Image (spheres, rainbow, N blue to C red):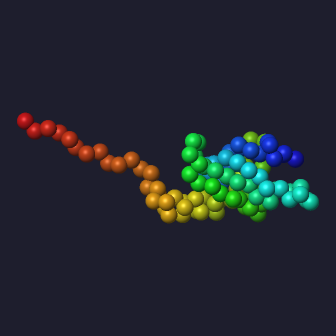
Amino acid sequence: MISKSQLINLPVRTQSDDHLGHVTDVEINEQSKEIEKIEVKSGKIFHLNTFLIDKEQIVKITKHEVIVKDTLIKEKQLLRRNLGIENTAPAPAINCEREG
């Protein structure tokens, strides 16, 4: 069994290998000693998104990563769209040739 301290900072990925962030907190049921939820934050310096992932959405936990169901990536995309950061492609270049 993996302890709470071992889970903190583990990368969290979907079944399709999309990176969601890292575990920042774990809620454990005191009676059953089972994980109820994990808190995941994305972004290296500024934690832009925070997810609370229920135990039903967790597919697998290893000592190297946490794998969650693919439905979470759809929630992340919806959140990015609502924040106005849906399109992360670079802006097109402008032709700045001089005449003369």
Viewer-closest of 68 and 53: 53
Q: Is residue 48 visible?
A: yes
Vertical comparison of 35 with 5: above or below: below
Tell me the quarter of the picture where residue 62 sits: top right
- Name the residue rendered at 58%, 62% in the picture: 74
Viewer-closest of 52 and 57: 52
Vertical comparison of 95 with 73: above or below: above
Residue 39 x, y percent position in the rendering: 70, 54
Viewer-closest of 78 and 27: 27
- Name the residue rendered at 14%, 38% in the picture: 98
- Name the residue rendered at 20%, 41% in the picture: 96
Residue 64 x, y percent position in the rendering: 74, 41
- Name the residue rendered at 92%, 60% in the picture: 31
On screen, residue 11 versus residue 92, left or right, reads right
Vertical comparison of 100 with 12: above or below: above
Residue 86 x, y percent position in the rendering: 47, 58
